Image (cartoon, rainbow, N blue to C red):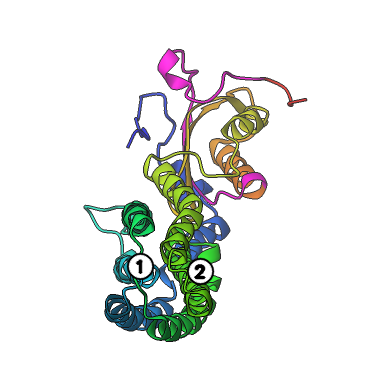
């Protein structure tokens, strides 16, 4: 990582924020947030995994027997979802492990790796289904509708149950959101297969089978792409959504006792776990002490920007090298 922690001879105390300025409320809030992450709904994932695996097997066998591409495509989605849910379950388990000397941030980022992998696999499956569907449109095959309709109805019920179980955890956790999207796509697939089976049974129009398969894949792709982009953004240590680095820099520069700010970095390890590092140039003419200045800075960052995990280094000299400023150029005064 490019988040520097250098210590020059002008630094009053590079760890002063630990011994004097890191108030207990901020400390408890930061670590409490990480603990909340570690209590991800593991039981919910395990329950949904069992349901999905059983339904995958049933749809794969039934799709092959009924010669339904829509049912086979749904089984393919279910297969990737089964693997995705297993990966998500492993990610939750590893994410609860404590940090160690080799991984000082712990294992929380497995959540993001799992979400990115899930999205990538779903995109590949969608492409595969599209290719197979083109062949079926050119050369339609007879479909056994009874098996198709029964399995689609069962799949719809199972996926609705799974969505209800996963919904709460998907709002604040990318790993759970990935699992929820997987199940959501399966629910749509089951509904589409059910409609296709009914149409074929009533009209004999078998081309609706590959059409439904492609429609489900195309519907899922945009949401999958959004999940993939969000995961990659975190892996690249991008600024979390809703965080304005320039606004943070301006607010810090406008504080009494602060002469300047440089090496300001904001990123996240996993969903909702936002971290900030910055070098604060001390105004030596200010009345406030070093500890008071750091307490004030930490409080502003937590209250105005909702970032409780901030690592600050206080300096008594102004940085005069171009490499110090990573955010926008300094803007004195309040923004208009």
Q: Residue at x 61, y 50 (%)?
A: 306
Mark earlier in primary sequence (2, 1): 1
Any part of residue 272 in sight = no
Q: Residue at x 35, y 25 (%)?
A: 8
Q: Is residue 122 left or right of residue 300?
A: left
Q: Is residue 94 left or right of residue 202?
A: left
- The stretch in magenta equals 304-331
Q: Residue at x 37, y 75 (%)?
A: 143
Residue closest to the far left: 102
Where does label 1 land, which residue? Answer: 69
Q: Residue at x 60, y 36 (%)?
A: 244
Q: Residue 322, image x and y in percent?
A: 44, 13
Where does label 2 land, which residue? Answer: 188
Q: Residue 40, image x and y in percent?
A: 43, 71
Report helix, strand or loop for mark 1.
Answer: helix
Q: Is residue 230 left or right of residue 142?
A: right
Q: Residue 288, image x and y in percent?
A: 63, 35
- Camera-side residue of 114 and 122: 122
Magenta region includes residue 308: yes
Classify 57 as above or below 236: below
Any part of residue 267 in sight = yes
- Camera-side residue of 17 and 254: 254
- Camera-side residue of 69 and 276: 69
């Amino acid at each position: 990582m490019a988040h520097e922690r250098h210590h020059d001879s002008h630094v009053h105390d590079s760890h002063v924020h630990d011994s004097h300025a890191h108030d207990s409320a901020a400390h408890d809030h930061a670590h409490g947030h990480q603990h909340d992450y570690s209590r991800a709904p593991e039981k919910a994932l395990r329950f949904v995994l069992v349901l999905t695996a059983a339904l995958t097997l049933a749809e794969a066998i039934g799709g092959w027997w009924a010669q339904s591409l829509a049912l086979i495509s749904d089984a393919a989605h279910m297969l990737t979802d089964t693997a995705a849910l297993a990966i998500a379950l492993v990610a939750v388990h590893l994410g609860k492990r404590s940090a160690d000397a080799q991984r000082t941030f712990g294992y929380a980022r497995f959540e993001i790796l799992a979400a990115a992998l899930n999205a990538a696999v779903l995109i590949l499956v969608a492409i595969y289904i599209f290719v197979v569907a083109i062949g079926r449109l050119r050369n339609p095959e007879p479909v056994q509708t009874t098996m198709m309709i029964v399995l689609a109805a069962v799949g719809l019920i199972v996926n609705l149950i799974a969505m209800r179980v996963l919904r709460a955890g998907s709002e604040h956790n990318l790993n759970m959101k990935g699992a929820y999207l997987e199940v959501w796509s399966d629910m749509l697939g089951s509904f589409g297969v059910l409609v296709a089976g009914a149409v074929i049974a009533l009209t004999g129009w078998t081309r609706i089978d590959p059409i439904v398969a492609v429609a489900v894949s195309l519907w899922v792709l945009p949401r999958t792409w959004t999940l993939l982009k969000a995961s990659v953004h975190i892996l690249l240590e991008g600024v979390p959504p809703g965080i304005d680095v320039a606004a943070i820099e301006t607010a810090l520069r406008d504080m009494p006792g602060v002469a300047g700010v440089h090496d300001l970095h904001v990123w996240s390890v996993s969903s909702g776990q936002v971290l900030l590092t910055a070098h604060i140039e001390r105004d030596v003419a200010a009345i406030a002490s070093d500890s008071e200045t750091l307490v004030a800075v930490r409080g502003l960052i937590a209250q105005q920007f909702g970032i409780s995990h901030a690592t600050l280094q206080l300096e008594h000299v102004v940085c005069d090298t171009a490499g110090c400023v990573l955010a926008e150029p300094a803007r004195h005064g309040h923004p208009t």
